[in-house]
Amino acid sequence: MINPFKKRKGKDTSIDADQLVDGVESQEGDQEVSPELSIHPQWRIEEEDLYVFRFQNNNLEALKPNQLSLAGIELNVVDDKGVSVSAFVRHSLPKAIKLEETSIVLLNHEGRKLARKSFNLSKLGELPAESSRPWVFEFAKKDLLVDLADIPTEDFQLAFELKKKRKEHQLELADSWKDSLGSADVQKLEEITKNVNPPKPGEVNFMGLDAKFLGSGNLQVTILIRNGSEKEINLEQIPLVVEDKDGDVVAQGGFKMEEFKVSANTSKPWNFIFPQNLIKKPSADLSQWKAYPPQN
């Protein structure tokens, strides 16, 4: 016979609901909420199991307003294939919600990550307002971050793994540019940096800003070097090809840079001057042009 007072073996974790749910409005006051049990419409469970779920849910701590929580119930090792973890998915929002694809991690009592997997939480269905829905999370062996033998069956936790919000891509200026540019020019560069789609995470690319032939016959191109990575980059040499409106190569050459660093997630403008001996098409139409590093 099932023990109707079967205790949970897992712990609880909570986050602010607006970190995963759109359109969350702040609630006044600090009155705690005890989410009511909600069984998925397609689940067919015995009355005894329903009683156990009710007992376990009623013994969970109340949530603060606008919280989303995972309360571990039980963890079972599935042969030699992985682990199966049951938990209550709870929230204290005063409206029904739907969750989407989300990364969930399995932790031990010290917070060490034991497993990680992305789950399609839309399969949970619509969660009624202030509800608690039991669910089973299956972690295959490939999802484990430790040996199967090191997975505890008690004092474990499930937690939503939230991606760090990427800070807004920003303009970076070398000191020489700060000293020489007027406020209007700086503002224009800031607007370009803000309004153009930022580079993809980890990507470094070049964006042409201006190209013109100087009175000396040299070609000057102004390029925005865009660093989409989370680390500062140091460019020692920059090879460049400039093409005109017709797709013809106007100039090609390499530029040795001294201490040219571009901070993480920033764009930095720089002038590159091609001497006449590197110019292949002095009569080029530069009303449209592009610059890029040559492909090896």
Image: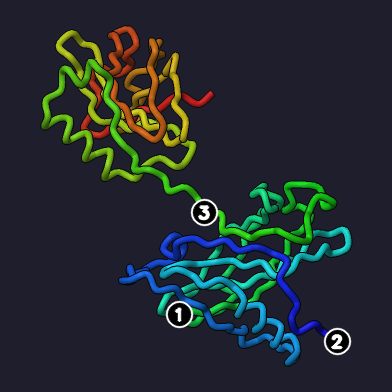
Sequence-earlier tag: 3 or 1: 1
Secondary element at tag 2: loop
Sequence-earlier tag: 3 or 2: 2
Depth check, mark 3 against mark 2: the one in front is 2
State whether residue 88 is above or below residue 233.
Answer: below
**Residue at the image point whose x is 44% and y is 15% from the top:** 237
Q: Which residue is mark 1?
A: 96
**Residue at the image point whose x is 49% and y is 60% from the top:** 15
Residue farthest bottom in this picture: 47
Q: Which residue is mark 2?
A: 1
Residue 244 x/y as whole percent: 30, 29
Residue 182 x/y as whole percent: 11, 25
Q: Is residue 126 visible?
A: no
Say whether residue 290 is left or right of residue 150. left
Image quarter for residue 40? bottom right
**Residue at the image point whose x is 39% and y is 13% from the top:** 259
The circle on residue 162 is 3
Circles 3 and 2: CB distance less than 8 Å?
Answer: no
**Residue at the image point whose x is 76% and y is 61% from the top:** 154
Quarter of the image with the C terminus is top right
The residue carrying pointer 1 sits among few (fewer than 14), some (14 to 19) or many (20 or more) residues within 10 Å by Cα, namely: few
Camera-side residue of 255 and 93 = 93
Task: Tell me the CA gap for discs 1 and 2.
Answer: 35 Å
Q: Amino acid at mark 2?
A: Met
Quarter of the image with the N terminus is bottom right
The circle on residue 123 is none
Sequence-earlier tag: 1 or 2: 2
The residue carrying pointer 3 sits among few (fewer than 14), some (14 to 19) or many (20 or more) residues within 10 Å by Cα, namely: few
Say whether residue 12 is left or right of residue 221. right
